Image: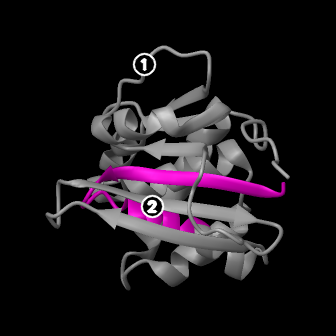
Amino acid sequence: MATTEMRFSGLGGQGMILCAYVVGRAAAVIDGRHATLNQAFGPEARGSACSAQLVVSDEPVMYPYVRGTDILVAMSQDAYQCFVGEVRDGGTVIVDESLVTPGATDRVRVLTAPATLAAEKLGKRIAGNMVMAGVFTAATGIVSPDAMRQAIRESVPSGTEELNLAAFERGLEIGRSIACPGEAVEARP
C-alpha cells in the first residue's frame, strides 16, 4: 500500500476523532508507517457534525489533507450523506447499520456493522467507536490488530482500557464476518 486517504465521521460525542487518532497512532507510532490527522468539529461540543481526515502512507505524507477518500467510516446519517460523494470509485464505506441507511450504489463498496448495538451489549454505548475501529481493522488491513490494541491502551482515558479493548475485539469479530482483510483497499502510488 502506498497511500490511503480516510475520513472518520459522525456526531460529536461518538468518539470518531479518537477512533481516527487511534488508527493513526497504530499506523505511525507502532506499525512504523507515516500518518497525518486533521479534525473538524461543529460549533457545539456534542451532537454536531465532526470528522477526522487521516492519511496513512508508506512514504512521508507531503499533503496532510484528504483529496479523495479511499475509506469512509460514518456513524451518523448526516456524516454519511455529507461525505459519501467524496469517496473514490471503488472505495470502501463502513457505516453503523443502526444509525446510517446507505443509499444504493455500485460505485463504492458499502459494509454495514452493528457497532452501537454491539457496544450497548457491552454496557457502554460510547464504546461504539472502538467497535467500529475493530471493524475497520478487520475489513481494511490498514493497521495490524496488535498495533491497534497497543494504541488503544495508550490513547483511551485511564480506567476505560478494558472496555475499549473488549469493544475493539468485538469489532474485529464483526469485521471478519463481513469482509476479508485487505480486500477493500487498493494501493495508490
Q: Residue at x 30, y 58 (%)?
A: 126
Q: Earlier along the polypeptide chain: callout 2 or callout 1?
A: 2
Horizontal and vertical percent for residue 120? 30, 47
Residue 3, disc: none
Crowding near the residue tagged with mark 1, few <14, some 14–19, many ≥20 C-alpha atoms within 10 Å: few
In the rendered structure, does residue 22 fall within the stretch colored magenta? Answer: yes
Rendering coords of residue 55 (x, y %): 63, 62
Relative depth, front residue between 108 and 116: 108
* Residue 110 in sight in this render: yes
Vertical arrangement, residue 126 with respect to residue 119, above or below: below
Do we see residue 124 in this rendering? no
Q: Is residue 155 left or right of residue 151?
A: left
Image height check: is 40 above or below 141?
below
The residue positioned 45% from the left and 75% from the top of the image is: 161
Q: Is residue 37 left or right of residue 60?
A: left
Quarter of the image containing the N terminus?
Answer: bottom right
Pointer 2: what residue?
52
Residue type at the position of mark 2: Ala
Helix, strand or loop at mark 2: strand
Residue lying furthest left: 44
Q: CA distance from mark 2 to mark 1?
A: 22 Å
Residue 15 lies in the magenta-colored region? yes
Region in magenta: 1-23
Determine whether the residue tagged by mark 1 lies in a helix, strand or loop. loop
Q: Name the residue: 19% across, 54% down.
A: 48
* Residue 180 place in picture, x, y as percent: 75, 35
- Residue neighbourhood size for the residue with mark 2, other residues' Cα within 10 Å, grouped as few (<14), some (14–19), many (≥20): many
Name the spot of residue 111 as percent of width and height, x first: 55, 30
> On residue 103, which mark appears?
1
Q: Along the horizontal axis of the image, is 47 left or right of 133?
A: left
